[in-house]
Image (cartoon, rainbow, N blue to C red):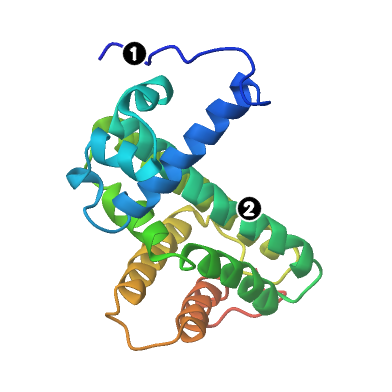
Amino acid sequence: MGGRLRAPTGRYGGRSAEERKAERRHRFLHAALRLFGDTPGYRGTTVAALSQAAGLSTRQFYEEFRTLEDVLAALHLQVNGWAERAVLDALADAEGLPLAERVTVLFRAYARDVTSDPCRIRVAFVEIIGVSPRIEEQRLARRARWVGLIRAEADAAAARGEAAPRDYRLAATAFIGSVNGVLHDWTAGWLDATLDEVVDELVRLLLGMLRPEGWRPGSP
């Protein structure tokens, strides 16, 4: 299909065309989260099945999206956006806290958001892999955004004398990989641990990265 169909314009049922469009998009993404994030998964879902799950028609699907890959791309950004919002909201609560407490508050906010629904984990860390060059580019760009957030926090901690001053690019990338793997395995039931235990272990890993053995506050 060359492009999306044109949706009707004007008010209907007291709602504008923009409001109806936003509601349809929300329903498609909500249904996609359930189907892509559980059974049958992204690769097993059809436009017809997604439309049925959303309670909408296939014509309405093509008014909002061109392909299922477009839905996956939008959903992946949405799931990451929810997690990022949770972390940014937690920043206010963490203001002025010592490094260990600050890191714990921020990371717990992230972990609780992404694990609040197993479907979010599968969409963010499983279904998104190997779909297409376009989706892979988006996945890497979103990961780079998380790496940038960690580097900013690490650089700020170093400036306060709470962490070792160095380039954290490689370390932040390695940490993101650890987070993705551990949270995926925990959600799948492969780790016999509570979420708090998982968070504490990952926080210890992050603090070890920020404060390597032998480093002391005030040392170069």
Circle 2/circle 1 CB separation < 8 Å = no
- Indicate the amino acid at tag 1: Gly
Q: Position of residue 182 (x, y in %)?
A: 36, 72
Q: Quadrant of the C terminus?
A: bottom right
Q: Residues within 10 Å of mark 1 (few under 14, many from 20)?
A: few
Q: Helix, strand or loop at disc 2?
A: helix
The residue at the far right in this view is: 96
- Pick whichever, 165 or 79, lies toward us: 79
Q: Is residue 47 above or below residue 196?
A: above
Q: Position of residue 57 (x, y in %)?
A: 35, 29
- Indicate the amino acid at tag 2: Arg
Q: Residues within 10 Å of mark 2 (few under 14, many from 20)?
A: some
Which mark is first along the chain, 1 or 2?
1
- Pick whichever, 107 or 127, lies toward us: 127
Q: What distance separates the C-alpha of mark 2 from that of mark 1? A: 32 Å
Q: Is residue 161 visible?
A: yes
The residue at the far left in this view is: 44
Q: Position of residue 207 (x, y in %)?
A: 55, 76
Quadrant in the rendering for residue 94: bottom right
Question: Who's the residue at 63% across and 71% down the image?
Answer: 103
Question: Who's the residue at 55% across and 35% down the image?
Answer: 23
Quadrant in the rendering for residue 34: bottom left
Quadrant in the rendering for residue 122: bottom left
Q: Helix, strand or loop at disc 1?
A: loop
Mark 2 — residue?
Answer: 85
Mark 1 — residue?
Answer: 3
